[in-house]
Amino acid sequence: MSLFKRLFGGGSPEPAPMAESQEYEGFTITPTPISEGGQFRVSARIEAVIDGEEMRHDLIRADVIRDLDEATDMSVRKAKQLIDQMGKALF
């Protein structure tokens, strides 16, 4: 790793280990918090089959949380909120 990447955190962020997916209102939510400098960015993958076609939306929020479990829980809550607000229009 180059000196500049170590000093300034260059490169792409690394996703945390994937948590178990869960079903919600016909959608599948997989929390995918992203590790960034000792914290975790709220992130989740939302999937559904609509009209026979597999659809996917990657939710990435600006929120960062220190604890992986809390970030995982927050990722699921934000995904559920987005599903409640947008439903199939999400795709």
Image (spheres, rainbow, N blue to C red):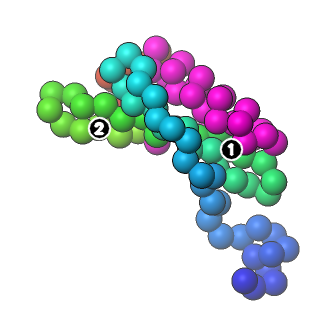
* Residue for point 75% across, 76% down: 5
Q: In this view, does 59 lie to the left or right of 89?
A: right
Q: Residue furthest bottom?
A: 2
> Mark 1 is on which residue type?
Arg
Q: Is residue 15 above or below residue 90?
A: below
Between 48 and 89, the one nearer to me in the picture: 48
- Residue that extends furthest to the right in the rendered view of this protein: 7
Mark 2 surroundings within 10 Å by alpha-carbon count, few (fewer than 14), some (14 through 19), many (20 or more) = some
Magenta region, mostly helix, strand or loop? helix
Per the image, the residue denoted by label 1 is 41
Q: Name the residue under label 2.
A: 55
At 15% from the left edge and 28% from the top edge, which residue is drawn? Answer: 51
In the image, 37: left or right of 49? right
Q: Tag 2: residue type?
A: Met
Instruction: Tell me which segment is drawn in magenta.
Output: 58-84
Residue 87, compared with residue 73, is above or below; it is: above
Is residue 62 something one can see in this rendering? no
- The quadrant of the picture occupied by the C terminus is top left
